[in-house]
Image (tube, coloured by chain):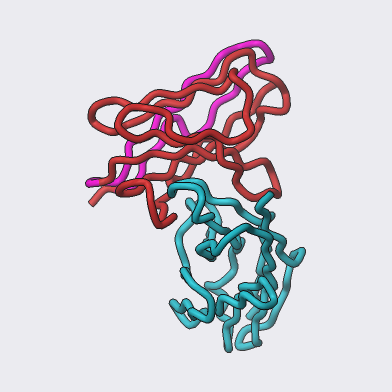
Chain colours: A cyan, B red
């Protein structure tokens, strides 16, 4: 079945450090891929998405590229800020499921220290 | 523009009881999906409602049921509560059933004692 695997957290970085959170997936067909972020005390928010191979999603300085050959969608940011501290979820939506059914990874907690 | 709102935010129940959680979708959205998020885990899909009917369902028992009203709001009902039902229940809304771009509420935290 379809699944998403993320690197385990927590990840602790200093401000302005480079961030990578690994995400790999297993899916039939060509899924859409997403990163959601959950700030403390808030609901999940869509951070970025990519709907086909080689697409790059970007938002708020974060980027992720849909790599079909390695079935990956790693999240990167060149210089993190304290305000980026949150839990990040990688997710996929299979083309065979009509919207609304996202399959999430287990989440990676990021803590950025000043 | 109000986002997705859920109620109640926190509640405590005992084993065997029943619970109803409520969700109002983002303005203009017509599709509601429910997710269960256990502590330290990613959300798991329960079911989706569109046009007042359950359209998709995840691997959850029949104890979990739902409803969508003509104004697109939705309820999640859980019967015969188990300790393992303790979790954050998230409602997400979207326009139509495609794309996977969901808008989430802050959730209802259910504790079963």
In terms of depth relative to the viewer, which is nearer, A47 or A64?
A: A64
Q: Residue A40's x, y, as percent? A: 55, 56
**B13 is within the stretch colored magenta:** yes
In the rendered image, the quadrant that contains the C terminus of chain B is top right
Left or right: residue B45 compared with residue B105: right
Query: Which of the 4 quarters of the picture holds residue B71?
Result: top left
**A72 is within the stretch colored magenta:** no
Left or right: residue B17 compared with residue A46: right
Q: Residue B37's x, y, as percent? A: 61, 42
Left or right: residue B93 compared with residue A50: left
Query: Which of the 4 quarters of the picture holds residue A76?
Result: bottom right
At x 49%, y 37%, the residue is B34
At x 59%, y 19%, the residue is B62
Eyeballing the image, is A106 above or below B75? below
In terms of depth relative to the viewer, which is nearer, B39 or B76?
A: B76
Magenta range = B3-28
In terms of depth relative to the viewer, which is nearer, A29 or B105?
A: A29
């Amino acid at each position: 079945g379809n699944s998403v695997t993320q690197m385990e957290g927590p990840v602790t970085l200093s401000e302005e450090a480079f961030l990578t959170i690994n995400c790999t997936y297993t899916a039939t067909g060509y899924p859409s891929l997403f990163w959601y972020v959950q700030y403390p005390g808030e609901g999940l928010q869509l951070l970025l998405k990519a709907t086909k191979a080689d697409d790059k999603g970007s938002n708020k300085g974060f980027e992720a590229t849909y790599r079909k050959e390695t079935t990956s969608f790693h999240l990167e940011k060149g210089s993190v800020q304290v305000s980026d501290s949150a839990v990040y979820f990688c997710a996929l939506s299979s083309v065979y499921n009509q919207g609304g059914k996202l399959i999430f990874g287990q989440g990676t907690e990021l803590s950025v220290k000043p | 523009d109000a986002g997705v709102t859920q109620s109640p935010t926190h509640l405590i129940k005992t084993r065997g009881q029943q619970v109803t959680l409520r969700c109002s979708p983002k303005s203009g959205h017509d599709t509601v999906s429910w997710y269960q998020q256990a502590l330290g885990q990613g959300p798991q899909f329960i079911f989706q409602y569109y046009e007042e009917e359950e359209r998709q369902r995840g691997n959850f028992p029949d104890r979990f049921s739902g409803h969508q009203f003509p104004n697109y709001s939705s309820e999640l009902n859980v019967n015969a509560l188990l300790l393992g039902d303790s979790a954050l229940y998230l409602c997400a809304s979207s326009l139509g059933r495609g794309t996977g771009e969901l808008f989430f509420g802050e959730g209802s935290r259910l504790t079963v004692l």
